[in-house]
């Protein structure tokens, strides 16, 4: 088995056919088919099943893919490293939404002061999406809020953050100054989507009290949820930094939930076998030094707040 076999296998896996793989690699289709057959003979198992001229990946192919991807990516990284020695090139960062909105801008300013010749590429998605990009080597490092379950990734907590219950100032929770978990789940809930770190933290805290909740509205957008809370359509549980200014302006009330701590960890995540450049180490040091407990809430970036709805 050679690197060429692995690259051809990856191309077939990602394009879905030997013809498309040949076109992508600019080689003859018979050469692709021959290389695939040699790879399957080498391991003694089929990588794809053939149905009516279409290929369907087998379990063996699925198992081989992350290793083949990692090996070919390592070669690419070695070439990048030798060209730049970690002081120039492209540094790819993936963050989940709260980190991207509130914490990342200052980190990037400090990082660019250290590495002005480094080009930054930033992606902001939920934790599951950032994890998939890390496994596909589309990112050099991730900063996430949710659980990471892949054995191929290293997870290092670096900051504690908290969610808070928010409602309109005229809501009974605001007038009482507190709420119970049982009262909370009885309210119309406006929540982030499943798979987001915010949703996972919220549901885990309720599960610890043998409670569950079904939202009347769920969204990938915090702005949409804030708009709905302002309109009086329900209550939400969201990251403190993203609601702090609305609370300070008296447009929303932040209400403690008795006996429930919506705490979560912000984590640095990276592939366990990935080359870690000087830029990587500098960036992660900045993350660790930014705050240990996240207790100081940061202002919402300009333009983040939704318009205030009447009534």
Image: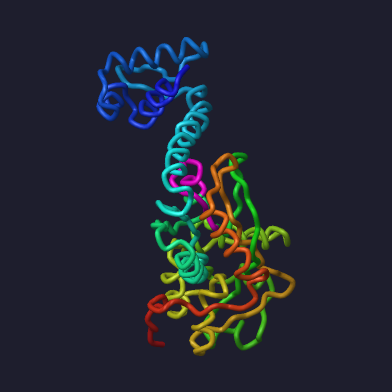
Residue 31 to residue 57: above or below: above
Q: Does residue 190 appear anywhere in the picture?
A: no
In this view, the residue in front, 157 or 226, is: 157
Q: Which residues are magenta?
A: 131-143
Query: Is residue 141 inside the magenta stretch?
Result: yes
Residue 212 to residue 227: above or below: above
Residue 275 pos. (x, y %) = 54, 43
Residue 290 to residue 203: above or below: below
Q: Does residue 287 appear anywhere in the picture?
A: yes
The C terminus: image quadrant: bottom left
Residue 74 pos. (x, y %) = 49, 36
Q: Quadrant of residue 125?
A: bottom left
**Residue depicted at 64% across the width and 65% down the height:** 159
**Residue depicted at 50% across the width and 69% down the height:** 110
In this view, the residue in front, 265 or 308, is: 265
**Residue depicted at 31% across the width and 26% down the height:** 21
Residue 1 pos. (x, y %) = 47, 16
In this view, the residue in front, 86 or 186, is: 86
Number of callouts in the render? 0
**Residue depicted at 41% across the width and 75% down the height:** 304
Residue 52 pos. (x, y %) = 31, 17
Residue 15 to residue 164: above or below: above
Query: Is residue 3 inside the magenta stretch?
Result: no
In this view, the residue in front, 38 or 310, is: 38
């Amino acid at each position: 088995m050679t690197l060429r076999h692995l690259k051809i296998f990856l191309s077939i896996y990602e394009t879905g056919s030997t013809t498309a793989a040949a076109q992508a690699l600019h080689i003859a289709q018979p050469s692709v088919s021959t290389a695939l057959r040699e790879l399957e003979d080498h391991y003694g198992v089929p990588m794809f099943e053939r149905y009516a001229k279409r290929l369907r990946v087998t379990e063996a192919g699925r198992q081989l893919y992350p290793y083949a991807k990692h090996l070919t990516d390592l070669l690419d990284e070695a070439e990048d490293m030798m060209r730049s020695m970690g002081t120039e090139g492209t540094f790819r960062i993936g963050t989940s939404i709260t980190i991207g909105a509130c914490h990342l801008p200052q980190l990037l300013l400090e990082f660019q002061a250290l590495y002005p010749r480094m080009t930054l590429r930033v992606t902001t998605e939920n934790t599951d999406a950032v994890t998939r990009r890390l496994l596909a080597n589309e990112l050099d490092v991730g900063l996430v809020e949710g659980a990471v379950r892949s054995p191929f990734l290293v997870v290092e907590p670096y900051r504690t953050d908290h969610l808070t219950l928010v409602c309109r100032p005229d809501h009974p929770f605001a007038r009482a100054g507190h709420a119970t978990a049982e009262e909370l789940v009885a309210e119309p809930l406006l929540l982030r989507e499943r798979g987001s770190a915010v949703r996972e933290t919220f549901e885990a805290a309720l599960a610890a009290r043998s409670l569950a909740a079904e939202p009347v509205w769920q969204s990938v957008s915090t702005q949409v949820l804030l708009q709905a809370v302002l309109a009086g359509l329900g209550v939400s549980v969201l990251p403190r930094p993203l609601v702090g200014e609305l609370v300070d302006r008296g447009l929303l009330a932040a209400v403690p939930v008795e006996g429930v701590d919506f705490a979560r960890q912000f984590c640095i995540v990276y592939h366990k076998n990935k080359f870690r450049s000087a830029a990587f180490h500098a960036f992660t040091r900045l993350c660790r030094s930014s705050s240990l407990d996240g207790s100081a809430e940061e202002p919402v970036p300009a333009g983040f707040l939704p318009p205030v709805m009447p009534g």
